[in-house]
Image: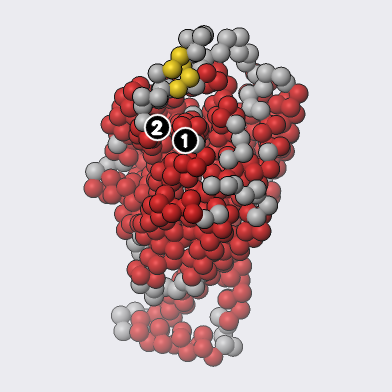
Amino acid sequence: MEIDKNNSIIENKNINPWLACLPTMSAAFMFVLDATIANVALPHMAGSFSVSRDESMWILTSYLIASGIIITMVDWFSKVMGRKTFFIVSILTFTFASFLCGIAKTMEQMVLFRILQGIGGGGILPISQAILLENFELKDRGKAMAVFGLVVVIAPILGPVLGGWLTENWSWPFIYFINIPIGLLAFILAKLFVFDPPYAQKQANVKADFIGFFFLSVWLVTLQTVLDKGNNADWFNAPWICWLSFISIISAVAFIISQIKNKNSLVDLSIFKDKNYLIGTSVQIIMQAVMYASVAILPQFLQSLMGYDAYKSGLSMMPRGLGALAAVIWYGKFGNKFDDRILVTLGMLCIAAGCFILGDLNLQISSVSIGFPNFLFGVGLGLSMIPIITLSMATLKNNQMTNATGLQNLLKNIGGAFGTSIVATLVTRGTQKHQFMLIRNLTDTTTNYVERVQAYTTAFITSHNPMTANYMAKGLINKLLIQQATLCAFIDAFRVFAVASLAIIPFIFLIKKIKK
């Protein structure tokens, strides 16, 4: 270990930088997995706590709000505590909060413990990313990010599968208990293999930005509430949504102004002067929106229209994970031989192709028809997500990494929240639109409709009186109408994802090419 004259650790040359991947990967996997593993278990938790499905959504919302606030403050906490210390505290807090979530007995306890879990988890992902980027030279960062990509891309896809299996075969508390051994392992490995460079060590006289923290908290709380509840409240037709949106916008503007003017700000927004960082982060926001929206919508389609259970619908996402795994392994081995911008473009084309194929759904599709486009989607994620992270950070200095990764992960989380909210609205409004369009064909003057009613009535009349049989026939046709309208809405949503994926490709080539 090399020590400077001030007794500061410069680097540990006796430790292989790949060993730093062990604690960062295990901790990041635990955090990212928890963002999606609870989704399929929400109905079971709602039943345990005797609350509605809508109320149970606060289990997800509280976690996202708390982690979002902490993500932005990662650089400040690292200065106050030292980055390694903050990383270890985050791991232990997250692990302990996971145990508390598993033993929660009321909805109030669960929301409180999820907030604590979000506070613990918020610093894990950006610090893990910063440590990996700093430990490797530029020529090796592609391989390091390929390893990191195993977590960032695959964990959200494994979440619904693992969550469904644990919920169906054990019970929902085990989706939280599973974090305990992973967290303890990450803690031990972090103690052994993570070291702070001078700029990441504890600093004296670090001042707190209480004004910035206040505006940040108000902004994220109101924004997340609007995005989570807006669709159910009919968006801006509800006065309280309008007020919360107004408060969110004002708070966001006030936060940005406070960070620009305050010398002791929570975050350094001057990082956005870097062209690669600005464009790369913007591209990742769209990618995150598409990824999280598609992860939310496909299991919903399979459960609501195809009759899949929670585990089977989660299992349907596995080809996406396999595709991402194959792409990440390929990138780690051959990525240095290609321009990263070309790889990102190929990845976005694969995502768009997968979405266009999923945009040709019908209710008689086989498992292969779901698996192939999912695999293609996964390949696209693996090819695009890792090089775009590398490109966005390539022109930054090491002492900017912690601040940069914190801001980037916050904005990516917001992108994911927007994507999930937008797709919920697309499906709801799209179903209404297509139902209105299709119902015009169901009139007594339409020959096909009359013939179908007569056929169904004849089938039901063997066990019911003529009036009841006719009523049941029309009810069945109405059910089929709603089913087809919902299917059309899902198709439209997947096509929107495809167009969004294609739309960001031109911006990729505005990023400065990195020599390898």
Viewer-proximal residue among 90 and 281: 281
Tell me the quarter of the picture where residue 220 sits. top right
Q: Of residues 393 and 314, which is closer to you in this image?
A: 393
Name which of mark 1 and mark 2 comes first in the sequence: 2
Q: Percent position (x, y) of residue 133?
A: 49, 35
- Is mark 1 in CB contact (under 8 Å) with mark 2? yes
Question: Does residue 268 appear to the left or right of 409 in the view shown?
Answer: right
Q: Which residue is mark 2?
A: 17
Name the residue: 47% across, 89% down.
451
Query: Is the residue 509 above or below the residue 53 in the image?
Result: below
On the image, the x and y values in percent for residue 498 come to 57, 63
Closer-to-camera residue (244/273): 273
Say which residue appears at 65% left-offset and 49% top-offset.
511
Horizontal arrangement in the rendering, residue 401 relative to residue 22 (left or right): right
Q: Amino acid at mark 2?
A: Pro
Above or below for 483 versus 326: below
Q: Residues within 10 Å of mark 2 (few under 14, many from 20)?
A: some
Which residue shows up at 58% across the image and 47% down it?
515
Instruction: Residue 283 in the image: state x and y as whole percent.
Output: 61, 50
Q: Position of residue 72 (x, y in %)?
A: 58, 30
Q: In the drawing, what numbered circle is on residue 136?
A: 1
Q: Secondary structure at mark 1?
A: loop
How far apart are the alpha carbons under marks 1 and 2?
A: 7 Å
